[in-house]
């Protein structure tokens, strides 16, 4: 069957422009997702640039050769820009313009524009380099949990390999892969391969955007808006995960329950704004003192809970003392003078697969003991309290779910 190259080009152009238009619509609905703009513009631009090849005599037309290829190179560069912007990295401004200008400069060199094989080789290698840069950007943040990242990376890697193969076959393959006479079958395969890569990359990139938005919403639902720490709901999810993970394991774990002293009096004397500032200061002190592996939760009001995995009792006491001492000297300035308070801390530790709610109950009892002893101190829960709480949880399932 004889394939019409003109029809293939027009169909490809139309599909790209429509697909780019969908990106424009999505970007207009969410202006904060700037990377969508960096994707919609090059897709539309590529579709428009392909129209150069519908001109009669495009093989010898300087406008088609110079500006058509420059537009496509710049478009792929913009896709790379979009990935960098998605990752929150700065853009190397002017580089995409430099790439397009460099191509036009090469076309001004005598003999270059007339050598089709050389043109195909250079533009293909340029595309391969830009695809490699996109793969590099996607690979750098591979641990962020976005499931669509790997398929997106594979699409760009596949495109890079396709462009590298095109450069290697530039002398022998039929056009548009190489400089040999046009073959409609090769044209159809190459056109749909190129179009397929753009389509799949766009779909996966949209999926990455949606996955990030969902992750941000989950993070917002699990975070305390005042302190930025995880909230009680996040603690419940964390407890369920740890219960599954620690079943049958023997590993040390410590848990701190922390309660700010005389917090109601601070609110009454200095106002609720001052109380909120003190809560923020405490959260900052805790984050500066704790390790990256520790989990910090605000359970509500002035009560906090810190989970320290793989931590012995001695280490947990040392961490708690650092937090207590650092917060003891932390103050805020108010119109009524400096305001500050202290914190009482209860610690429960275990080397067995004990549920977190059992540790919380034991550490909570230790906090009450710390307050009874005069506040601003660290108290370690007695081992017997852990046994008592575990037994109570086994007898009363409702207590286990509390």
Image: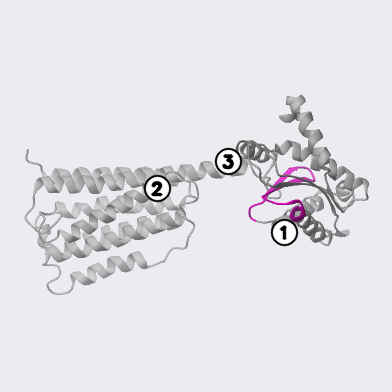
Q: Coloring scheme of the render?
A: one colour
Check disc 3 and report its element: helix, strand or loop.
helix
The answer for how far apart the CA atoms under marks 3 and 1 are is 26 Å
* Of the image marks 1 and 2, the number of the one nearer the N terminus: 2
Residue 24 in view (yes/no): no
Residue 329 in the image: above or below residue 162: below
Q: Nearer the viewer, residue 249 or 100?
A: 249
| Residue at 52% in and 41% down | 214
Q: Residues within 10 Å of mark 3 (few under 14, many from 20)?
A: few
**Residues at marks 2 and 3, CA–CA distance in whole angstroms:** 22 Å
Q: Which residue is mark 2?
A: 150
In the image, taking residue 82 as reference, residue 188 lies left or right, namely left
Q: Nearer the viewer, residue 140 or 195?
A: 140
At a point 35% along the width and 53% down the height, the residue shown is 41
User: How many dots with numbers?
Assistant: 3
- Horizontal and vertical percent position of residue 175: 11, 54
Q: Which residue is mark 1?
A: 289
Category of crowding for the residue at label 2, using alpha-carbon neighbours closer than 10 angstroms: few (below 14), some (14–19), many (at least 20): some
Which residue range is magenta in the image? 292-316
Which residue lies under the disc numbered 3? Answer: 218
Residue 15 part of the magenta segment:
no
- Mark 1 touching mark 2, by CB under 8 A? no
Q: Is residue 179 left or right of residue 244?
A: left
Q: Position of residue 140 (x, y in %)?
A: 45, 57
Q: Is residue 296 in view from this perspective? A: yes
- Looking at marks 3 and 1 on the same chain, the residue that comes earlier in the sequence is marked by 3
Q: Position of residue 360 (x, y in %)?
A: 76, 40
């Amino acid at each position: 069957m004889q394939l019409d190259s003109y029809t293939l080009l027009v169909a490809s152009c139309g599909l790209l422009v429509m697909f780019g238009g969908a990106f424009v619509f999505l970007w207009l609905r969410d202006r904060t997702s700037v990377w969508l703009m960096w994707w919609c513009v090059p897709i539309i631009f590529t579709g428009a640039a392909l129209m150069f090849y519908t001109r009669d005599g495009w093989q010898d037309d300087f406008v088609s050769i110079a500006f058509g290829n420059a537009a496509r190179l710049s478009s792929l560069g913009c896709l790379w820009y979009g990935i960098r912007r998605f990752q929150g990295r700065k853009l190397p401004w002017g580089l995409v313009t430099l790439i397009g200008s460099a191509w036009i400069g090469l076309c001004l060199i005598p003999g270059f524009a007339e050598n089709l094989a050389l043109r195909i080789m250079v533009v293909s290698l340029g595309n391969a380099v830009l695809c490699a840069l996109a793969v590099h950007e996607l690979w750098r943040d591979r641990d962020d949990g976005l499931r669509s990242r790997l398929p997106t990376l594979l699409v760009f890697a596949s495109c890079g390999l396709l462009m590298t193969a095109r450069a290697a076959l530039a002398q022998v393959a039929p056009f548009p892969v190489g400089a040999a006479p046009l073959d409609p079958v090769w044209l159809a395969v190459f056109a749909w391969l190129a179009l397929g890569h753009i389509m799949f990359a766009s779909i996966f990139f949209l999926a990455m955007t949606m996955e990030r938005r969902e992750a941000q919403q989950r993070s917002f639902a699990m975070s305390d808006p005042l302190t930025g720490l995880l909230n009680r709901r996040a603690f419940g999810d964390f407890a369920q995960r740890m219960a599954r993970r620690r079943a049958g394991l023997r590993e040390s774990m410590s848990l701190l329950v922390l309660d700010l002293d005389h917090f109601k009096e601070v609110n009454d004397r200095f106002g609720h704004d001052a109380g909120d500032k003190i809560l923020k200061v405490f959260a900052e002190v805790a984050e500066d003192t704790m390790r990256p592996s520790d989990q910090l939760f605000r359970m509500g009001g002035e009560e906090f809970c810190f989970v320290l995995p793989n931590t012995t009792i001695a280490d947990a006491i040392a961490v708690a003392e650092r937090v207590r001492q650092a917060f003891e000297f932390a103050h805020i300035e108010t119109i009524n003078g400096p305001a500050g308070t202290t914190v009482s801390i209860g610690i429960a530790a275990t080397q067995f697969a004990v549920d977190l709610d059992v540790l919380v109950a034991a550490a909570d009892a230790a906090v009450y003991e710390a307050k009874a002893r005069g506040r601003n101190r660290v108290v370690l829960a007695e081992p017997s309290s852990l046994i008592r709480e575990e037994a109570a949880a086994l007898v009363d399932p409702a207590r286990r779910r509390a």
